[in-house]
Amino acid sequence: MKVEVKKVDKLKRIIKIEVTDEEFLAKKAEVYTQLGKNLKVPGFRPGNAPVEILEKYHDKFLKEEFLKEAIPFFYNKSLEQENLNPAAMPKIYDVNLTDRKIEFFAEFEIRPQIVLSDEDYKKLVIKDKDVYVSESEVEKILTNIKERIKRVVNKELSDDMVAHWASYPNIDKLKEAIRAEIFVEKLRDRREKINLQIFEQLLKNIKFDLPKVEVEKMHQQLLEHQIYTLKLQNTPPTDIEKYKKDLEDKLKPVAEEQTRLLYILNAIAQRENIKVENDLNVVIDFILSEAIFK
């Protein structure tokens, strides 16, 4: 197999693949023999007809099926031979098949090679604040609960009666539950802010080119999610169409940022031998374990 690699830019590649002689004939015989098991040929039992006879009766079908098998087979083999790692499926074109040769071109972008150092993601500085729930915050929520109940019963209730309405034995238990709920929400908000600090520093420290096809795929996914959300909110189709262009523009930098972060987190996982198992949060947790909190 002969493979020629053309470097179009930093990530885009075009490869020309040419397979001839014994390698081509061996693959052809393998595919044709397998297909021939289910093809009827006069004078032969299924699976016993020679390749030449099969071609005489089923030439078009055999060639079509052979291309389906041979192109991905030799394409993947060429990637392994040239040590290429595509970011997405290739564009296949100019396919030329003869009795003794197959030749085609494949165009694709490769995944970027990300070179990391410890300084890129270890000892990141994280600004943090203690999580605290004030009595005024609890009272504010409690007042809102009282107002909602008052609109239903149309009269003032004692604190313990309010607690009973909220399924708690007394006002102290209700306040305790409110305080816990506010605390959990603040913890969630704290973690989001910490994550944002991590992401900002990673994006600043680690630079590389992104495959356009990956960014476009992420952009489409984000756009579809936003449109789906609008539909759930019963937004009229005419309004969705009106918002679509604005959403497309706003989501482009988001798609690029998220794609870049995915590459970075996966690169860190690989460098640190972290088992991701479809959950990159374990990589963020690792970065946090190495971070400096201030």
Image (tube, grey):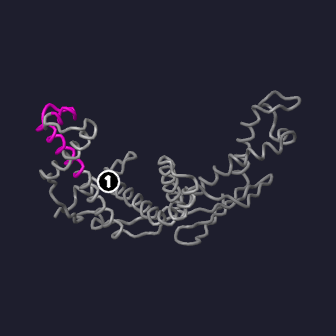
The N terminus appears in which quarter of the rendering? bottom right
Which residue lies at the image location 56% right of the left edge and 61% below the top edge? 242
Task: Categorize mark 1 by other alpha carbons within 10 Å: few (<14), some (14-19), many (20+).
Answer: many
- The secondary element bearing badge 1 is classed as helix
Check if residue 164 falls in the magenta segment: yes
Q: In the drawing, does residue 271 fall left or right of residue 124? A: right
Q: Is residue 230 visible?
A: yes
Q: In the drawing, does residue 79 fall left or right of residue 127? A: right
Q: In the drawing, does residue 144 fall left or right of residue 4? A: left
Measuring from the top left, give residue 228's x and y in whole percent.
51, 49
Measuring from the top left, give residue 251's x and y in whole percent.
47, 63
Relative to residue 39, is residue 26 depicted above or below?
below
Measuring from the top left, give residue 82's x and y in whole percent.
56, 61
Q: Residue furthest bottom?
A: 9
Picture quarter containing residue 61? top right
Look at the magenta stretch and give its main secondary structure. helix
Q: Which of the pair 92/102 is nearer the observer?
A: 92
The C terminus appears in which quarter of the rendering? bottom left
Pointer 1 residue: 283
Relative to residue 237, is residue 2 depicted above or below?
below
Q: Is residue 83 visible?
A: no
Which residue lies at the image location 22% right of the left edge and 63% below the top edge? 126
Q: Which of the pair 186/88 is nearer the observer?
A: 186
Q: How many marks?
A: 1
Measuring from the top left, give residue 111's x and y in whole percent.
49, 61
Which residue lies at the image location 26% right of the left edge and 42% below the top edge? 148
> In the rendered structure, which segment of residues is drawn in magenta?
161-186
Q: Residue furthest front?
A: 154
Check if residue 160 falls in the magenta segment: no
Amino acid at the residue labelled 1: Val
